[in-house]
């Protein structure tokens, strides 16, 4: 029996690392500007090959945090690596801001179109700050509700959580993905999840990546003073908005032109999943220092 196979999804696999590319781009820009803020960047980079250790739908896997996951759909693998990366993030105190960018769901394209990122955050002031930062950066961002009604759809009779939801991801898929992510965030963290599945890729004839999210993250870090007030965080001195714009736009251009190169670099990991930590307190020559925290076999 012969099944028709299309290689289009494979040729567009570069989009799957769009969130990591944006975060790394923001790290590079912030390394050059050196804002008075302690920042940590975690990239969960892993291969996506079929092998004898591949997961089947219905498999139960244990995340690094100890939470057991029932694999509802093997095509929803991004959320598993994103959730695992949180366990390897350094121990951060309560009140820490956690921004997560990833290409979670094609459903965000259905809901918001190809050029708009979907934002989910449990704190209104944080969401407002991010939307404002995105607007100033020229990036379109829309806040979706983290409706508790959908939390029960992630329940599993076999594990602590179902990775795709009991309904198989049909209906409110972007929101349930955000709720899944919330289950792995450290208690007390001020977190936000941005789904850039549509906005990360240039849908025009030129192809490649857009660098979406870099400028928004850079501006948000510089606005931490406003976001943190009232929650025990100290106000942080901000550089001029003009400086933020010039620096971040340069990185957006870099990642737009070298999107496939960035993906190729991830292939040099030799099928070993790695979690990288980029600590902006120890940058040199405007390039973030990256070190392997741990390898997962």
Image (cartoon, rainbow, N blue to C red):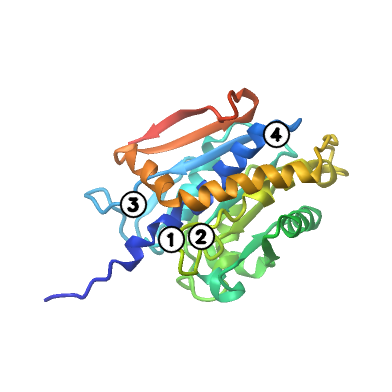
Q: Residue at x 71, y 55 (%)?
A: 137
Q: Are marks 2 and 3 in contact (CB under 8 Å)?
A: no
Q: Residue at x 56, y 30 (%)?
A: 287
Across and down, in percent, residue 247 comes to 67, 42
Residue position for label 4: 33
Among the two numbered marks 4 and 2 on one chain, the one whose residue lies closer to the N terminus: 4
Asked whether 63 or 44 is in front, the reply is: 44
Q: Nearer the viewer, mark 1 or mark 2?
A: 2
Asked whether 16 or 25 is in front, the reply is: 25
Q: Nearer the viewer, mark 4 or mark 3?
A: 4
Q: Are marks 1 and 2 in contact (CB under 8 Å)?
A: yes
Between the C-alphas of marks 3 and 1, the distance is 11 Å
Across and down, in percent, residue 116 comes to 62, 67
* Residue 223: quadrant of the picture: top right
Q: Residue at x 49, y 66 (%)?
A: 165
Q: Are marks 4 and 3 in contact (CB under 8 Å)?
A: no
Circle 1 crowding by C-alpha within 10 Å: few under 14, some 14–19, many from 20: some
Between the C-alphas of marks 4 and 2, the distance is 30 Å
Circle 4 crowding by C-alpha within 10 Å: few under 14, some 14–19, many from 20: some
Residue position for label 3: 48
Residue position for label 1: 76
Among the two numbered marks 1 and 2 on one chain, the one whose residue lies closer to the N terminus: 1
Residue position for label 2: 104
* Residue 14: quadrant of the picture: bottom left
Q: Regarding mark 3 in the picture, which secondary structure is present there?
A: loop
Between the C-alphas of marks 4 and 1, the distance is 36 Å
Among the two numbered marks 3 and 1 on one chain, the one whose residue lies closer to the N terminus: 3
Q: Regarding mark 1 in the picture, which secondary structure is present there?
A: loop
Q: Residue at x 50, y 57 (%)?
A: 209
When the figure is inspected, residue 6 is found, relative to residue 84, above or below; the finding is below
Q: Are marks 4 and 2 in contact (CB under 8 Å)?
A: no
Q: Nearer the viewer, mark 4 or mark 1?
A: 4
């Amino acid at each position: 029996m012969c099944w028709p196979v299309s290689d289009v999804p494979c040729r567009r696999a570069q989009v799957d690392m769009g969130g990591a590319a944006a975060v790394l781009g923001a790290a590079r820009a912030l390394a050059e500007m050196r804002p008075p803020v302690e920042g940590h960047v975690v990239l969960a980079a892993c291969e996506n090959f079929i092998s004898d250790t591949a997961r089947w739908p219905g498999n139960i896997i244990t995340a690094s945090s100890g939470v057991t996951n029932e694999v509802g759909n093997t095509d929803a693998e991004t959320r598993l690596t994103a959730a695992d990366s949180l366990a390897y993030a350094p121990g951060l105190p309560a009140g820490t801001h956690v921004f997560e960018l990833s290409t979670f769901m094609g459903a965000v394209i259905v809901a918001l179109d190809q050029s708009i990122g979907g934002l989910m955050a449990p704190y209104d002031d944080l969401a407002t700050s991010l939307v404002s930062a995105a607007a100033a950066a020229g990036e379109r961002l829309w806040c979706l509700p983290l409706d508790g009604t959908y939390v029960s759809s992630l329940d599993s009779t076999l594990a602590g959580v179902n990775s795709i939801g009991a309904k198989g991801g049909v209906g409110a898929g972007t929101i349930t993905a955000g709720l899944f992510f919330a289950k792995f965030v450290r208690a007390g963290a001020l977190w936000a999840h941005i789904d850039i599945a549509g906005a990360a890729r240039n849908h025009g004839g030129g192809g490649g990546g857009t660098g979406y999210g870099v400028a928004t993250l850079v501006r948000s870090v510089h606005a931490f003073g406003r976001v943190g007030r009232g929650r025990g965080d100290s106000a942080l001195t901000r550089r001029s908005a003009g400086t933020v714009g010039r620096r971040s736009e340069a990185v957006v251009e870099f990642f737009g032109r070298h999107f496939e190169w960035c993906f190729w670099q991830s292939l040099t990991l030799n099928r070993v999943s790695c979690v990288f930590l980029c600590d902006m307190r120890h940058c040199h020559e405007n390039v973030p220092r990256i070190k392997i925290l741990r390898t997962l076999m």
